[in-house]
Image: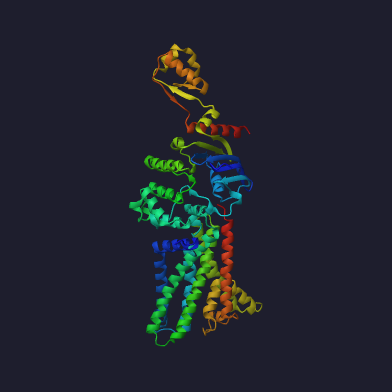
Amino acid sequence: MLMSPVCVIAKKEIQDSLRNRWVLFISLIFLILSLSVTFAGSAVAGHLSLPELNALISSLSTISVFIIPLAAMLASYDAFVGEDESGTLLLLLSYPISRTQILMGKLVGHSLIMSATISFAFGVTLVLLLLLGDNYQPQLLLVQFGQFIFSSILLAIAFILLGYIVSLKSSEKAKAVASVLLVWFMFVLIYDLLLLTILVADLSFFNQYIINALIALNPTDLYRAINLIGMETGNGSLALFASSAWGLSALYGIMLLWLVILVVITGQMFKRRSL
Amino acid sequence: MSASIAVSASNIRHHYADFQALDDISFAVERGQTMALLGHNGAGKSTLIKILLGLIKPSEGRVNVLGKDLSSLRNRADLKMGYLPENVSFYDKLTGKEILNYFAALKGIGKVRVEQLLQEFGLEYAQDRTLKTYSKGMKQRLGFAQAILSRPELLLLDEPTVGLDPVASKFLYSKIDELKQQGCGVIVCTHELSLIENNIDMALILAKGKALAAGSLSDLRAASGLKTRLTSPQLLEAIALQPQLTSMLCDDALLLDKQQKSAVVKLLTNQCQLFDFSLKEPALAEIYHFYMGQCAQVVEVS
């Protein structure tokens, strides 16, 4: 049976990632982090107990917001520059397939890889909590974890696409690695830190609309807001994300808009990339 | 356009910003013919290959591939073309069979053809090994097999034998010969002139984006004016008998043009009883260097 070129390319990307043990490595990292935060997170307070669900999701999303973007971009940064360096991009383009099909094939492949690793790591944690955690309402646990996993996948796809942009802009793989670290640093650390500073400083000219706009302008802050909205997260800076005026569906809508815009930008950059 | 033409280009010009990569290039390759595409680094060979593949549109001129005008072609799947890029490095973590299956699936070709090619190219024993365990020759054979997956009617090969040992190179050229006999037009871009010399029907020599010369080897020899070398262990004794040959002597050989050749051979055999001699036509490498030298002189003068 003939497969569409998108499926063929996606299958090859998955095969490649499985073969170089990328999937195994990232799955284990996510799993160890997830289990540590869930079952050993309370150790810092001097006792061992399972945290409350809101506190758990808050802790997990705080860790994931750093690690998921980095893993996603490391999976995707050489998608184009790597193939270009090895000569296979030119060969692929000589085949009767469009650039959009190549891009979508890679995106589907990398998205499935990240979805599998995220679902596995946090899914195992969820199953263990369902088996061991007597204090949780199973239905609420399923809903909260479902949302957490889904938003983590969306965050991963956004950073896969940012990895593609870096890959398409770079002329060498080595430069792409450096650029990926810079993008990660800017989106995950610097922007977040500046936004939190503004939120905490409570500057008079920064009204809620500007703050909401600033949250919408970075997928990592959208991710935090999706997972913290409506939660009682105490008086810390995270509480300010929780009180964001965006509704949950609006936050998801903006995240999807991010993905659409990134796909369009990546597609245009690929079409304009000189051979 | 004749149905026997595999590919033709008329007055191709292409520029990148203010750099003229190709300037008024025209040629035609018939089905069943091999053309060597020669030129220095940066001569425009890769640009020309990309134009023939339909990856870039020429600034001016027309390209006709397998009877179809590339500028008006909607679906490239209609063209049975094969391509082997220079120094291509396939996916190291995949096996030879997985790589061929991948490219076959992208062209909508079944696994039976993949198995047939693995066998034909002597890669069956290594088909389940990852590519990183393959030698250079095996990788190149795999690349060649990839290029002919769709039984192409036009094959473009960019440096197919670079870094290969003589046996591996001979094997690839024997495959090219088989394809030619089946009516496939072949363009080989190479710097290995001595290797390709006996495997081509014509050559196109490019320099600085311009076509310096084009035609069959005998046309190029005639056009260049390069002379045939006649050597013999008894040459000096023959010249002593026939002093008029002295003007043709250069180093230890007589340099003969086309008109002189048969007369001198007749003279040596009839008058000097000299039968132990050899005639060496100008090689492709000499023709190439002659045209490159001419081009360098023109640039120097201008």
Which quadrant would the C terminus of chain B be assigned to in this image? Answer: top right
In the image, residue A122 lies at what x, y percent? Answer: 43, 76
The residue sitting at 51% across, 72% down in the picture is: A154
Residue B182 to residue A42: above or below = above
The residue sitting at 53% across, 65% down in the picture is: A161
Query: Is residue B48 in view from this perspective?
Result: yes
Left or right of B99 in this view: B48: right
In the image, residue B249 lies at what x, y percent? Answer: 48, 19
In the image, residue A131 lies at what x, y percent? Answer: 37, 83
Where on the picture, by quarter, is residue A190? bottom right
- Observer-nearest residue: B139 or B107? B107
Residue B195 to residue B89: above or below = above
Residue A202 to residue B135: above or below = below
In the image, residue A97 lies at what x, y percent? Answer: 52, 57
Where on the picture, by quarter, is residue B277? top left
Which quadrant would the N terminus of chain B be assigned to in this image? Answer: top right
